[in-house]
Amino acid sequence: MNYANLQYNQPYNVGDILIGDTSISEYTVVYSSSASNPAKEFVKYIKMATGFELDCVQDTECQVGENEILIGKTNREGNTVNIDRSKCTNDNEAFVYGVQNGNLYITSNEQYYGTVFGVYDFLEIYAGINFFDEIETVDVKKAFYVPSNLNYFETSAVNDYRVVFSDYASKNEKWMAKENGANITGFYHSLPSLAKDPSEFKANWDYQVQYHKDKDPCLLDPEIQQNIITNATKLLGNRGGVWVAMSDGTAYCKCNEYCAPYIRQHGRMGAYFNILDVVADSLEGTNPDAKIVGLAYKYIWSMLEGYDAKDINDSVTFVVCTDNMCGTHSITSTGCKNEANPNNTYEKDLGYKVQVEHGYKECYDRIVELCPNIYIWDYIYPSRHNEAPLPLFQRMYDNYTYFYTHGASGVFLQDHTGPNACFALLRSYMATKLLRNAGNMSEKEYWAYIDEFLKEYYGDGWTYIREYIDYIFELSQKNEWHIWSSEFWDDIITEEQYRENYDYLMGLWEKAESLAQTEDMAYRVRRDSTQMKYIELSLAYRDYAASEKTDADLKAYTDIRDAYIALLEEYGFDMPNVGNINPDFWNYG
């Protein structure tokens, strides 16, 4: 990457794109009826890179010619090109592109996103286009060369779906961040509603949501199991999968008739794992390819014991939630000391017995051994205080690499609760990069991508923001914290650490802003520096709480609070419920 590749330097950064020895300016884009949009995207970005506006026409509206760029499955196949799609099989996102007889082709099996992904991939590699979500840049280069014998194929990095985002970032993401998923239907905390009498059950989202906080039913009672089978079948219809997952609460059945002995044998998660197999077996004759999807979630997280993988139906699918993971250490780290939610298995001496506390990695590895299909539901932001600094990039590389090389076939990225200052777009960008490489990206390459993004997004002061990311990570290593556990702002980095380092950390943002080449870059720096403004506010409240609480003391605090809230409004961030002046208890929208 040439770090001089910013669009604002000149109108067109790429001198030319040569296909073999021929300038791309001599080519015509020819597209199939289903590839109109990818073809228009191709033309748009080629012009953005080179200044050349290529003619673009549907294959049935023009004669076969020379120097054609064929997008989709055109009527030129078997004539000027012969394309082998056999490796694409039924993969909705696989694509092929290459050059034959001087013609460039970009295509897929045309089932879903394959062709458009192929277009974006080609543009990244051979036109220097960088898709940084809300901004797009072009590499500065005299010419790109497309080999005359090019023949490239890429399939999904994972089997079932690429990164699926939960929020706004996916609307602008150009590369591998589509919300196609595996077509799973129903609400993801479904069991209380699925257990209802079939005469009462309604196969819609709202019906399921109203019961999701209820206690989970007895999952081993034959009558309740039949209700779940009947209702799940109705809900599934002809879709690719159905949620058969736990409620969003701590309550569960412990009846002596069924559950207590089963849990003793198979662990807390056992009954939830079993119902997936029961439903999958019941549907094997009518819908054998449907995924029966459950959650390995916070309240049921335990070691699965007493099962044999050969007895588990091939349709059983577990979505492994990462909320129980250590927030400081990666899954492969041996340094985790947190005893409540350990990353590593350890023995706990209770006095009257020694109890084994199973670590996250061991539990995850056991699920992978048993379950035919593993998806990841990843939490990478604090749920309560979504503006606090979030040192997750070191951990993110290790975890995603491990997941992709150890069984995961899909990822849902619970990225953020809305626009915020916590590097949300960078996390989204790096998730797609990690997924595309499927565990084959080196750590050096990973950080090079981050540096590239920071440079393009924040400008010449990007090194200070990288220093900030590294430093808050080092601060966090002295502590133990977990994501999605009602954490407070000083759980990740302590109040004492913030007080000692506030001026230094805030100063890094100020230095970055002073070097930004454009107002857009300076704006992004100011906006994202509000994560330290949130810390300033929290420290100010602690100062107020320790004061004599005079009117002057209150005003000193509320002035900082009002200024912070004004920043949130200016940047379109979620507004907190500020009924309580203590920001520890603010909840964002």
Image (cartoon, rainbow, N blue to C red):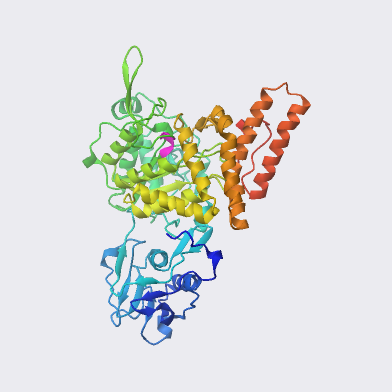
Left/right of residue 330 with respect to residue 5 in the rendered view: left
Q: Is 156 a magenta residue? A: no
Q: Is 324 a magenta residue? A: yes
Image quadrant assignment for residue 548? top right
Q: Which residues are magenta?
A: 322-327
Is residue 221 visible from the viewing direction of this image? Answer: no
Is residue 211 visible from the viewing direction of this image? Answer: yes
Up the image or down, 574 lies above or below 307; here it is below
Who is closer to the viewer here, 568 or 162? 568
The furthest residue to the right? 551
The furthest residue to the top? 352
Left/right of residue 378 with respect to residue 536 in the rendered view: left
Image location (x, y in percent) of residue 98: 32, 71
The furthest residue to the bottom? 63
Image quadrant assignment for residue 124? bottom left
Q: Tell me what residue is drawn at x 32 percent, y 80 percent.
A: 102
Q: Tell me what residue is drawn at x 63 percent, y 35 percent.
A: 536
Image location (x, y in percent) of residue 404: 33, 47
Q: Quadrant of the N terminus?
A: bottom left
Image location (x, y in percent) of residue 576: 64, 39
Who is closer to the viewer here, 122 or 232? 122
Q: Quadrant of the C terminus?
A: top right
Q: Tell me what residue is drawn at x 35 percent, y 12 percent.
A: 351
Image location (x, y in percent) of residue 75: 35, 80
* Number of numbered markers: 0
Up the image or down, 527 lies above or below 557; here it is below
